[in-house]
Image (cartoon, rainbow, N blue to C red):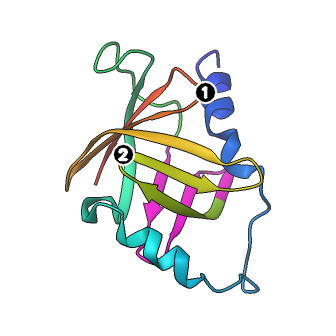
Amino acid sequence: MNRLIPFLLSVSAFVIQPIAFASEKPIAINQAVQQSACNEDLFGTWTLIYESTSLDRGKTAPPMSMIQTFDREGRSNLKIDPFLDATNTYDCAGNKLTINKIVPTNLNLIRLSATEMVYLEEGTEQYFYFSK
């Protein structure tokens, strides 16, 4: 339980904006241009396998399942069963990913390849290790 609370707090920023359903607005042209700046390896479905408070040290299994998807149309979905299923748009700029919400979430990509993604969420000391 002690590990669950910090985990939920670190991902709670993804739910500040209400979830949009069928009434979602179309993505603007400048949004599509922003997606072209993204590394091709980003697109797809990622599963959280470890987390840590120090890069590549003290990795622990996450307290619950977390899946994050990035599509070419500029949408990111974060799913933490059974608590969260949130979709937001995102932008890429170099090694920084911004999840667009009322209060944006900035993710600093540490490593990104076809099969591995590691990021540090700005404002936290939590590293997230994903596998595709």
Q: Which of marks 1 and 2 is nearer the N terminus?
A: 2
Q: Residues at badges 1 and 2 in contact (C-beta under 8 Å)? A: no
Q: Mark 1 points at which residue?
A: 123
Residue 83 can be seen in this image: no
Left or right, 101 with respect to 119, comes to right
> What residue is rendered at 64% in x and 23% in y?
6
Q: What element carries label 2?
A: loop
Is 70 colored magenta in this rendering?
yes
Q: Mark 2 points at which residue?
A: 95
Q: Quadrant of residue 120?
A: top left
Q: Where in the figure is residue 96, as x and y percent of width and height? A: 44, 46
Q: Where in the figure is residue 57, as x and y percent of width and height? A: 30, 14
Q: Where in the figure is residue 129, as x and y percent of width and height? A: 35, 36
Three-letter amino acid code at the position of disc 1: Gly
Which segment is the magenta one?
65-85
Left or right, 78 with respect to 61, comes to right
> What residue is rendered at 49% in x and 42% in y?
107
- Closest to the observer: 63 or 107? 107
Crowd band around label 1 with a 10 angstrom C-alpha radius: few (<14), some (14–19), many (20+) = few
Residue 14 can be seen in this image: yes
Q: What element carries label 1?
A: loop
